[in-house]
Amino acid sequence: MALLYESNDEGIQLLLSILNQPNGKQLLQNYRQILRHTVFGTNSFRIPKNQACKKNGVGHWDRECSYPYGNEELHALTKAWKAACAVARSKVVISAGTYKLGVVTLLGPCKGAIELNLQGTLQAPSNVASFNGKDFWVSFQRIDSLTMSGGGVFDGEGQMAWQKNNCAEKYSCKTLPINIRFDFITNSIVHDIKSKDSKFFHINVMECKNLQIQHVTIIVPGDSPNINGIHIGRSSKITITNANIGTALEVLEGTNEQPVSGIRVIGGTLSNTKNGVRIKTWPSSPPGSASDMHFENIIMNNVANPILIDQGYCPNNQCSNKSPSKVKISNVSFKNIRGTSSTKEAVKLICSNSVPCQQVVVANINLAYKGAGGFATSTCVNVKPTVSGKQNPPACTSKQ
């Protein structure tokens, strides 16, 4: 794996820290794969093979190093990360190419801001047994001021594992590895990366604050199982913009969780998906709340269930239905949503009879259905939405 670490201020100390190890010189001699070149300011350094770190003419150390293919990319990446994390303002670059990478945790806190610049493609093990029970492939934990960039790909190699993904059929299914986990990440930005063919969720965001996700692409084939694109929980100030998500985006609330609030999905196009914009809770959910959630200016292309609140969510009827959901849903709006529905029931607002939905607004909806059985319909259960503007289908065609 061709890796670069760059420190704006402390590159010398980085290299010296390696040399000061008992086998430091041997480590440097073993570096086999190198970057073609990189530019620092006005200087461009080309590192000869097997001389990844070399004194220059003025007695300083060049700040460009490649890490050994070794054992292999996993060792190289963790070495580079630890070195970069130990200094202020640093960067780890994975150059163009395809690299097989095992399960890895990149851990903070770091001394300063740190960037992972992925220009190549990382490939996960295809066999789930290689993960030794871990529920993730690449994990970033407890880092402040992280930047991830580069246009590269995290390829989860999920095709083999999808045969074992039965979560759409079984309530208590075995969790498969997530492509990328962000846990306890603050004041950070992830942009211009791709996640492909994850075995389970593509990106999981948990206990994060002030995280921006921009120009991220989620790549999945149309016949992949029920896999979320970006899964968010116990987090605040998460912004997702200009994303191309080939599967679902979900914000979750589980048992004894904090309330979910402040969700805004503005602008976007969904095509050929199993659901459009959806709020769901399980039957028998404990008391909780979900509020201040708004979905606006969205185009639906042949989408099933384009607008959906489902407080009886129970795939394959394998959950407890002893009591209705106790999650209170309020202050929700669906505005300026248009396009085509692949299901006759284009708008479904199914709220709990224990805690009916309140302050639900439905405005300027135009969803056409061209299948069998006539025009599109809408259903309202335990909710009386405020309706305005165009309504196709007519609001609450069916009421309960």
Image (spheres, grey):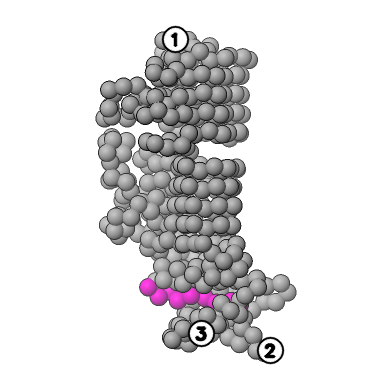
> Secondary structure beneath disc 3?
helix
Magenta part of the protein: which range?
63-71
Labels 3, 1: front one: 3
Please tell me which residue is depicted at 65% across the width and 71% down the height of the picture: 8
Question: Which mark is drawn over residue 19?
Answer: 3
Q: Which x, y percent locates residue 349?
A: 46, 19
Please rate how many residues cluster around mark 1, counting C-alpha atoms within 10 Å: few if below 14, some from 14 to 19, many from 20: some
Q: Quadrant of residue 317?
A: top left
Residue 337 higher or lower than 203, as above or below:
above
- Alpha-carbon distance for marks 3 and 1? 74 Å
Tell which circle, 3 or 1, labels the residue nearer the N-terminal end. 3
Q: Which x, y percent locates residue 106?
A: 46, 62
> Secondary structure beneath disc 1?
strand
Please tell me which residue is depicted at 41% across the width and 62% down the height of the picture: 104
Which residue corresponds to mark 1? 399
Q: Amino acid at mark 2?
A: Val
> Secondary structure beneath disc 2?
loop
- Alpha-carbon distance for marks 2 and 3? 18 Å
